[in-house]
Amino acid sequence: MTSVYNTLQKYWDIYDVQRERVTKKIKQFTDADKLRRRANQQLAQQQPTVSDIEMDAKKLLHELRVHQIELEMQNEELLTAQTEVEASLERYTELYDMAPVGYLTLGRDGAIQQINLRAARQLGIFRSQLKQQRFSSFISVDSLPVFNDFLSGVFTGKTAQSCELTLLPADRSPTLIIQFEAIANDDEQTCRVILIDITERKGNEEKLKLANLVYQAIGEAIMVADADNRIVTVNPAFTELTGYSLQEAVGQSTTLLKSGHQNEAFYQIMWHALETTGHWQGEIWNRRKSGEIYLEWLTINTVYDDQNKVRHRVATFSDITDQKHAEQTIWQQANFDSLTGLPNRHMFYERLEQEMKKSRRVGLPLALLFLDLDHFKDVNDTLGHCKGDLLLKEMAQRLLNCVRSTDTVARLGGDEFTIILAELQEQDSIERLAQDILCQLTKPFELAGEIAYVSVSIGITLYPEDTDDIDVLIKNADQAMYAAKDQGRNCRHYFTISMQEAALTRMRLINDLRNALVERQFWLAYQPIVELTTGFIHKAEALIRWQHPTRGLISPADFIPVAEATGMIIDIGEWVFREAAQQAAQWRTKHHEQFQVSINKSPVQFQKEGNGHLAWFEHLRELGLPGESVVVEITEGLLMDAGALITGQLLAFRDAGIQVSLDDFGTGYSSLSYLKKFDIDYLKIDQSFTRNLSPDANDLALCEAIIVMAHKLGIKVIAEGIETQEQCDLLMAAGCDYGQGYLFSKPVAAGEFEKLLVAG
């Protein structure tokens, strides 16, 4: 503060010295006696010699001339003094305005009486507009009481020499924080004021306060060391994390926390980075005061002095032990199967890609095995999913016991597993492993008091022999696995090119099938169902046909399984029903009012349509047809898997008057309980029983037994595949109700079938 007053006094002193020097000079030249003597001396030199002028006149003239010279000399001196004063004032004003601080004079009431350019700029207004404005009009509301008290104290001598105020500049420039210093003048009516802009200083102070607050409150530990790696200071988070207080840490070496888990090579790399770049960060194991080892993420930055020498090193670190555990858990969940602990699909792809690269590098082939449990669904359905999970866990362990430690066993999901056999020295080892797996998995599984038996189908493909593409390799193994299932399951099958060709054919079939319905390539054939005792044709089975534009007639045996697998059977089945119902309406009107059309409904339709049967009922109402105008044909497999959804649909058909026919009876897991539970109306004896019928054949006895059983339950029987009159006679003698086969007619188009009705 003393320096500020010294600066203020300097500007005042400059002005006072100049004023005093000029005043003395004016007094010097306005002294009367000296002025008269000088005038007389000058006049004596100029006085003419006139002989005829009287002495009195001469004296008078002399006096007048003296006075004239006195005035001229006085005027000249005054002009010189004025010039000097103006020059002095100009220099003073320049110093006054260009002062590094604001300077002004205030009255007792706070009115601005005099102000320099710096202060005017601080107040954000032109100096010409400031005359007699009150300084308080530029002060924030919060600072106004401080200013009023301070100004009052200046004139009473009861206040400090300075205070801090917040200015609100008139030109709306940013707010200023100023140090306001004042001294009362001798007249005690005014005071001289200095305004020092301390905005930047206050901002820096706030930043320092904030930095200190952050330093104290931050969650990361901070340790500052000197150039000799001695700890200078630490923050509270350091104490909380390590257990060492500030007093315990200061002065210690930075090795205070060293755990011994890192070798010398680790620290050499760290110090090399610090010495060359001034920075290092990474994971490091350290030791708390308690001796506990923890993992931290450490960042070290170097602070240099003006000579670019190390002044301090600042280390910030945090405990990431829990984070690492969480990351490991997440990684484990993302890459490994939670049930078996085996690599999951994601990790399997990574491992396979790595092994393929390695195979190319070392020149040794690898084998990929794709495994799928046979009838695993039966285990879940009979023993429950918990027992099924136990079986999968045990299966994983058995597979691991069969392979080398360098091989990979993975679970892709459900009951699908894969094995990667890397660096094969001989391909015979693949066969040995496959046989070992087949043997191990046929052994009984003990599942918490229950015993279960399963088998496995294995598909095998080789890299790079079969392909060098990872996706194709997996697809090849999958195709080989399905080939094993088609061979009867519980076996292994190697991939062949013919499988690929079959897969391509199937893909083309799927693509063509998507267009077939839109392009009206389907049509219905009808095969008569003949009443054996009368020969009347009152029933027919509707059979779909596909007339491909380039491949010709495609068998339903080729495209129906594909339609079921892709879900396209839903739309195709809906089309078949509507076409057949429309035809039934025509034939009931034109030929026989009790005519029935049998329509095959796929298990997929039952499982995926949900309430699709309600649309059938509505369409029959629109056509004016009763429920008994159509018969729904189903297979035994549907009844085996009949849950609430399927059972509800079958009962809904019964309630709507739609009869149900059970196709291919005797070829599957035939059960009388199904017939009783679902109120079946017709049994169809499969053609495998009728094809070789003869009076002494066992098939005849089976047919007779089926017919008797069905009739006892109130069910009528339809025999399929009748091709000879002998077969027809034997069945009719056994009491069979209806027959169907080439003896009567092959499936024909609606027009041809109508001719049969007319001829009938």
Image (cartoon, rainbow, N blue to C red):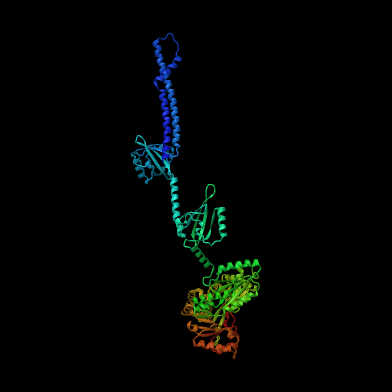
- In the figure, is residue 11 to the left or right of 459? left
Question: Taking the image as drawn, is residue 708 in sight?
Answer: yes
Picture coordinates of residue 376, whole percent (x, y)? 54, 77
Instruction: Specify whether residue 729 is in view.
Output: no
Q: Is residue 450 above or below residue 86?
A: below
Q: Quadrant of the C terminus?
A: bottom right
Q: Position of residue 457 (x, y in %)?
A: 59, 76
Q: Position of residue 495 (x, y in %)?
A: 63, 73
- The residue nearer to you, when weighing 20 against 415, is 20
Q: Residue furthest bottom?
A: 696
| In this view, 485 is above or below 105 | below
Q: Please tell me whether residue 31 is drawn above or below residue 648 in the rendered image.
A: above
- Please give left or right for residue 353 compared with residue 325 in the image: right
The furthest residue to the top: 52
Q: Looking at the picture, tell me which residue is in the foreground, 481 or 583.
A: 481
Write the residue at 58% across / 67% down. 350
Image quarter for residue 504? Answer: bottom right
Quadrant in the picture for the N terminus: top left
Front one among 619 and 347: 347
> Tag count in the figure?
0
Image quarter of residue 430: bottom right
Residue 700 percent across, percent down from the top left: 57, 89
